[in-house]
Image (spheres, rainbow, N blue to C red):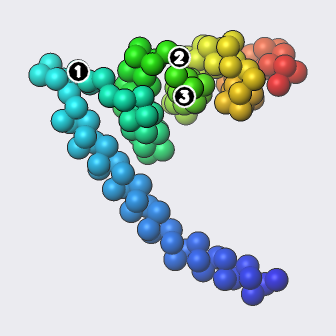
Amino acid sequence: MTKYLLLFTAIVIGFAPVFGQQSDAALRRVREQDSISRDSSGKLQTLSAAEHLSRAETYSSNRLFPEAREHWSKFFENYPADVGIPKALFGTARSYMWERKYGDAVKWFDKLTKDHLNTKDGREGLAFKGASYVRMGKNLEAAKTYEQY
């Protein structure tokens, strides 16, 4: 058992720099693409739904939340019926939570759970909404949210 644990640890440590480099490369690529995907006034152009979601995910995983929200916003404006809406709502809400803007996070979690409670993101949104309420010191609202969860 110990031998397998040591082997697993060695593999993880050996690949850790590769994963970081992939993330860095993805971020560099997305930043470069964003710089050429803007009009003369600097406004982000409309891309495909998948591209907006992909770029938002790259920014979010690198904790660049305003940049991620810019893509989610374009996604909401242009693809309101897309199957990726729950994921984008969840990402937007979580981005505010990570920035400790818990009131904003709750508003976005409400949008998510209102119409998408039957999805994985919707159900997880309830748990994070409860956590946001706890961090705001609104324990009664948190308890009600956790009961719903």
Q: Which residue matches tag 1?
A: 43
Indicate whether 27 appears above or below 3: above
Gap between marks 1 and 3 measured at Cα: 23 Å
Residue 107 percent coordinates (x, y): 60, 13
x 36%, y 55%: residue? 24
Give the amino acid at mark 1: Lys
Residue 121 percent coordinates (x, y): 67, 30
Side of 23 where 118 appears, left or right? right
Q: Quadrant of residue 9?
A: bottom right
Instruction: Tell us which disc is closer to us: 1 or 3.
Output: 3
Neighbours of disc 3 within 10 Å: few (<14), some (14-19), many (20+): some
Identify which residue, 16 or 118, lies in the foreground.
118
Farthest-out residue, right: 147
Give the amino acid at mark 2: Ala
Q: Earlier in the sequence, mark 2 or mark 1?
A: 1
Neighbours of disc 1 within 10 Å: few (<14), some (14-19), many (20+): few
At mark 2, the secondary structure is loop
Q: Which residue matches tag 3?
A: 84
Indicate whether 75 appears above or below 31: above
Identify which residue, 132 or 22, lies in the foreground.
22
Q: Which residue matches tag 2?
A: 81
Q: Which mark is residue 144?
A: none
Side of 18 where 114 appears, left or right? right
